[in-house]
Image (tube, rainbow, N blue to C red):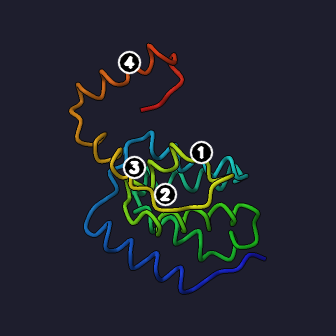
Amino acid sequence: MNQYNAAKHKKLIVLGKSLEKGVTHKLPESFIHSIIGTLDFFGASAGELQQAIFDLTVAKYKIFDVLGMMYSSEYYQAKPIYAAIEKLVDLYIAQAHVGGFAWFLRGHDLDIEEPHHCDDCIKSYDEFMSLTPEQRAAAKAKLIETFGDVIEI
């Protein structure tokens, strides 16, 4: 069985309450896909993916709540997916920025990289979120023109 660390869980909850205080997460759907895709890549079952999708899109739980529930759950601790959950928790703590956390998942590979703080991810997320809907549409059109309709923005 995987090792639960109460101090890490507390750090996640304290940080998350500070970062996501009084707000429902506002991550674009493509960022939620990055979180779900990461869980899928690391072997989450269909039921585990459905639960994460429900928690993030229907129940609209905060990111730290979803991670905290998964991390502290004895169910997940007995599953191979727990290693990925630990990496996501470590990343959330290292980034200390909800959007930067999600952007990291879009541009880094947790299969070969350890979770770490990335200022570029935070900057890129903040720049992306400052774009108007028209600017986002233009950026998406340019990506589609360059790479085809395979990139989600």
Q: Disc 4 or disc 1, which is closer to the eye?
A: 4
User: Residue 15 versus residue 94: which sits nearer the camera?
Assistant: 94
* Residue at 52% over, 79% down: 9
State the separation of the CA atoms marked 4 and 2: 33 Å
* Residue at 51% over, 18% down: 147
The crowd level at tag 3 (other Cα within 10 Å; few <14, some 14-19, many 20+) is: few
In this figure, which residue is indicated by the disc labeled 1? 37
The crowd level at tag 1 (other Cα within 10 Å; few <14, some 14-19, many 20+) is: some
Q: Position of residue 30 (x, y in %)?
A: 45, 39
In this figure, which residue is indicated by the disc labeled 4? 142
In contact (CB < 8 Å): disc 2 and disc 3: no
Residue 120 — which label?
3
Residue furthest bottom in the image: 7
Position above or below: 47 against 16: above
| Amino acid tagged 4 | Lys
Position above or below: 152 against 83: above
The crowd level at tag 4 (other Cα within 10 Å; few <14, some 14-19, many 20+) is: few
Q: Which tag, 2 or 1, sits closer to the chain's start?
A: 1
* Residue at 43% over, 63% down: 95
Which quadrant of the figure contains the N terminus? bottom right
Q: Position of residue 145 (x, y in %)?
A: 44, 13
Residue 5 — which label?
none
Q: Position of residue 96 (x, y in %)?
A: 39, 66
| Amino acid tagged 3 | Asp
| Amino acid tagged 1 | Gly
In contact (CB < 8 Å): disc 3 and disc 1: no
Q: Disc 3 or disc 4, which is closer to the eye?
A: 3
In this figure, which residue is indicated by the disc labeled 2? 55
